[in-house]
Amino acid sequence: MALSPTNDAALLQEVDEAVRKDQLDTIMQRYGRWILGGAVAALLAFGGYLYWGHRQDVVRGEKAEELLAAFDKVKSGQPTAATAALKTLEGEGNPAYRAAALIEQSNLKAQTGDLKAAAALMAKVATDTKLDQSLRDMALIRQTALEYDTLKPEAIVARLKPIVDAKDPVSSWFPSAAELSAAAYYQQGQYDQAGKLYGRIAKMPGVTKSLQSRAVQMAGMLGVDAVADRAAESLKADAERVRAAGNTDNGDQKGAPGAAAAAKSEEAK
């Protein structure tokens, strides 16, 4: 008696399942220990990674507390104890805390008048390739300022040129580097170069008022009309603000162009 098509399909399915089970049994017999060992190793590695991350967080917290304690010693007038704590942090390997420790030690040296030692400490930060470039730029500028009186003007210009010439992106420390470079150009008698740099500083947004004032004065003395440039930019900004206010208020609120025109019309009547 022949099997129906339905029975044929069921038989084939049973045979297929038996073959797969036999293959799986064979694989487990041959490689089961390796598979189990690999799974256990993966779990252990993941657990170790989690524990390592936790320990890193704990260590960072401890180092932060040590750094704050050292700063407190500085504020309370304990430079010797502060220096000892900072040296400990400097030698423990973390780049960020090492940089902070070196910078604070440099500040302490500068306060005592030891500018050479202060500059040497800043140089360590400036040349540390494990640090963010912005922090290294700051350290280089600080080092240059500390050494300014002992360096030739051309050496100052050459040292700070990468920061001054940076375009994409412009260094966040450009104003400070440019001011030192402009002063060096002035010492060399390159007044055009000095004036251009002072003019660039004067026109930069976000520059501190004191630096902007110095830059405007020096630029004007060297024939660069930074005041006019700033005035034009200020007028343009004011016009844009008035236009924006007019668009928002549809010219109907006090202070908008439409309100001002209406007020003048009433006065004329």
Image (tube, grey):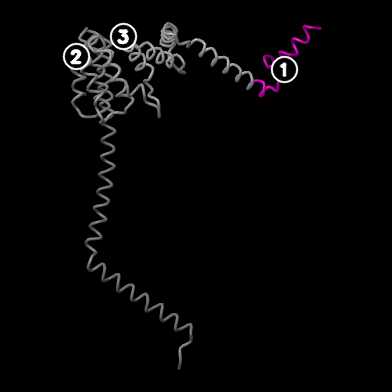
For the residues marked 2 and 3, what is the alpha-carbon distance in whole angstroms? 25 Å
Report the mark closest to the observer, 2 or 3: 3
What type is the residue that disc 3 sits on?
Gln
Task: Establish if 262 lies above or below 54.
Answer: above
Q: Write down the residue under mark 2.
A: 117
Q: Write down the residue under mark 3.
A: 187
What type is the residue that disc 1 sits on?
Gly
Callout 2 crowding tier (Cα within 10 Å): few <14, some 14–19, many ≥20: some
Quarter of the image holding residue 252? top right
Is residue 80 found inside the magenta-colored segment of the image?
no
**In the image, which disc is placed on residue 258?**
1
**Residue found at the far bottom of this picture:** 1
Instruction: Of the two numbered discs 2 and 1 on the same chain, state the one appearing first in sequence.
Output: 2
Magenta residues (range): 245-269
Secondary element under disc 3, as helix, strand or loop, is: helix
Q: Tell whether 120 sits left or right of 242.
A: left
Q: Main SS of the magenta segment?
A: helix
What type is the residue that disc 2 sits on?
Ala
Looking at the image, which residue is at 33% across and 76% down?
A: 19
Instruction: Of the two numbered discs 2 and 3 on the same chain, state the one appearing first in sequence.
Output: 2
Residue 27, percent from left and from top: 26, 68
